[in-house]
């Protein structure tokens, strides 16, 4: 079989499927990251990877420098419009944006889309930090700014760096990973005691009960680690808690850094 230089093919149950250059690039990056996690590589490989990671960090810093104070919303990409958790995410995004905060998400579909959409419903600011995956996760259409990352740890750092509070709606392993990383950062004092809010009470109560009745009793975490979670389904309560904590406890005064043309910077809008 002959192949042109701009594409490749793969076999599937429906015959031959053409893979475009972008998908091929994502597959190559996934293979590259698997090699990275196997252990030591050549010195040249480690150096070039370190430079790529630095470049990704720098790109994120420059792109997100002007987003303003954020609240990060976590949640599943698999919950779509028509589900009551999608509507809850949309209402929460709108309520947060009304207080003047930028709504930040992973930039994908599902709950992430809902929160970004809610922010745009009230003409608020909305940004996304997406991750490059072999099976592409496209950005949702409700974003003022969108940054794509190859490395999960860089993406998670960006979601934490610019936010004054964190809201977790129902989600899977990715949501749990993001939620407990933030909880660990707060527990260990790496970030200040920003609110961690669980929206979707019926979904989160079994997990919180496990933390309280198993992990606390076994002494692996403290009661304060569980009490730190705020569980509510009220968008207004969430927005009020976020605004009050940021402004009165941490002295936040809303403002956005201004781009400098001579640094080739630009605003998100």
Image (spheres, grey):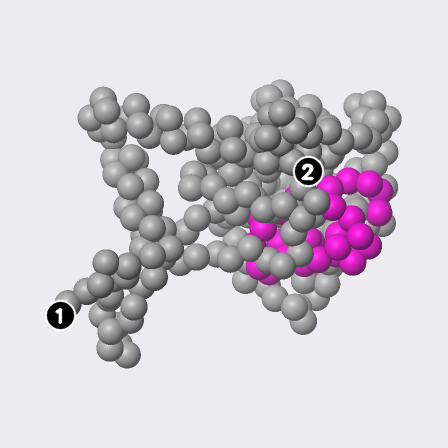
Q: Quadrant of the C terminus?
A: top right
Classify 170 as above or below 253: below
Q: Quadrant of the N terminus?
A: bottom left
Identify the residue at horizontal 33%, vertical 57% (top origin): 21
> Where are the magenta residues, as a range?
98-125
Examine the image and state in which quarter residue 87 appears.
bottom right
The residue most toward the front is 262
Q: Nearer the viewer, residue 248 or 130?
A: 130
Q: Position of residue 242 (x, y in %)?
A: 79, 38
Q: Which of 240 and 268 is in front in this view?
A: 268
Identify the residue at horizontal 24%, vertical 77% (top origin): 15
Check disc 2: other Cα within 10 Å, few if <14, some if 14-19, many if 20+: some
Q: Where is residue 124 in the image (x, y as percent from the top left)?
A: 78, 48
Q: Which mark is residue 267?
A: 2
Q: Name the residue under label 1.
A: 1
Q: Which mark is residue 82?
A: none
The disc, 1 or 2, on the residue closer to the chain's N-terminal end is 1
Q: Position of residue 161 (x, y in %)?
A: 61, 30
Classify 74 as above or below 254: below
Queried whether the magenta region covers residue 148, the answer comes back as no
Identify the residue at horizontal 48%, vertical 46% (top origin): 131
Q: In this view, does 67 lie to the left or right of 174?
A: right
Mark 1 near mark 2, Cβ–Cβ under 8 Å?
A: no
Examine the image and state in which quarter residue 80 appears.
bottom right
Q: In this view, does 249 lie to the left or right of 67?
A: right
């Amino acid at each position: 079989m002959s192949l042109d230089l701009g594409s490749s093919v793969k076999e599937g149950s429906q015959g031959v499927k053409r893979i475009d250059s972008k998908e091929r690039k994502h597959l190559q990056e996934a293979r590259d990251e698997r090699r990275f996690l196997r252990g030591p590589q050549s010195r040249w490989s480690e150096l070039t990877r370190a430079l790529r990671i630095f470049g990704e960090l720098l790109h994120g810093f420059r792109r997100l420098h002007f987003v303003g104070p954020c609240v990060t919303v976590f949640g599943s990409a698999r919950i779509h419009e028509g589900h009551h958790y999608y509507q809850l995410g949309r209402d929460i995004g709108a309520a947060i944006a009304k207080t003047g905060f930028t709504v930040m998400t992973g930039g994908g579909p599902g709950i992430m889309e809902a929160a970004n959409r809610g922010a745009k419903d009230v003409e608020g600011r909305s940004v996304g930090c997406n991750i490059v995956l072999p099976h592409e996760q496209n950005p949702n259409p409700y974003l003022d700014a969108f940054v794509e990352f190859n490395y999960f740890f860089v993406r998670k750092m960006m979601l934490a760096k610019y936010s004054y509070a964190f809201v977790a709606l129902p989600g899977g392993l990715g949501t749990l990973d993001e939620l407990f990383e933030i909880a660990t950062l707060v527990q260990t004092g790496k970030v200040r005691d920003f609110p961690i809010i669980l929206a979707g009470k019926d979904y989160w109560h079994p997990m919180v009960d496990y933390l309280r009745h198993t992990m606390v009793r076994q002494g692996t975490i403290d009661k304060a680690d569980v009490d730190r979670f705020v569980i509510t389904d009220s968008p207004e309560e969430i927005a009020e808690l976020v605004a009050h904590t940021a402004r009165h406890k941490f002295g936040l005064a809303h403002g956005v850094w201004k781009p400098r043309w001579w640094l080739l910077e630009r605003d998100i809008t």
